[in-house]
Amino acid sequence: MTLTVKKNEVKLVLQKLDCVQLELLRLRSILLPETEVTEEEKKEIEAARNEIAKGQKISLEDLVKELC
């Protein structure tokens, strides 16, 4: 059985994943007070926000690695 995926569908999935990542970062910042976040974590969060603002994307494989 062959799976055919259109480029538009892949692009849509990647856009949705970007939105999920941004939402996870937003929720994390709400749930964890600033005093509990390490300096390294602050830098990672800021870097991720900058990447999202620039329109940079994360590969699905990297996202899975990051979440698991």
Image (cartoon, helix red, strand yellow):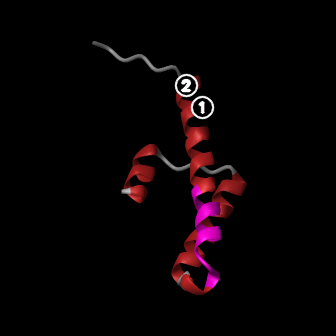
* Residue under the image location 58 percent in, 75 percent down: 32
In the orientation shown, which residue stands out farthest toward the front? 31
Q: Answer above or below: position of 17 versus 28.
A: above
Q: Residue at x 64, y 58 (%)?
A: 51
* Residue closest to the far right: 53
The residue that mark 2 highlights is 9
At a point 55% along the width and 25% down the height, the residue shown is 9
Q: In the rendered view of the protein, which quadrant contains the C terminus?
A: bottom left
42 to 59, vertically: above or below: below
Position of 28 relative to 18 (above/below) = below
Counting other residues with Cα less than 10 Å from the Cα at mark 2, is it few (<14), some (14-19), or many (20 or more)? few
Amino acid under label 2? Answer: Glu
Between 50 and 24, the one lying in front of the other is 24
SS at badge 2? helix
The front one of 8 and 42 is 42
Q: Could you tell me residue 58's position as x and y percent?
A: 52, 50
The answer to which quarter of the image holds residue 26 is: bottom right
Question: How far across and how far down the image is residue 11, in percent?
Answer: 58, 32
Q: Badges 2 and 1: C-beta atoms under 8 Å apart?
A: yes
Query: The residue tagged with tag 1: helix, strand or loop?
Result: helix
Q: Is residue 2 above or below residue 46?
A: above
Q: Amino acid at mark 1?
A: Leu
In the rendered image, residue 54, in percent from the top left (x then y), is placed at 71, 54
Find the magenta span and give its range. Answer: 24-34
Is 15 colored magenta in this rendering?
Answer: no
- Main secondary structure of the magenta stretch: helix
Magenta span contains residue 30: yes
Q: Quadrant of residue 14?
A: top right
Instruction: Name the image quarter holding the N terminus.
Output: top left
Picture quadrant of residue 27 = bottom right
Determine which residue is flagged by label 1.
12
The residues tagged by marks 2 and 1 sit, at their Cα atoms, a distance apart of: 5 Å
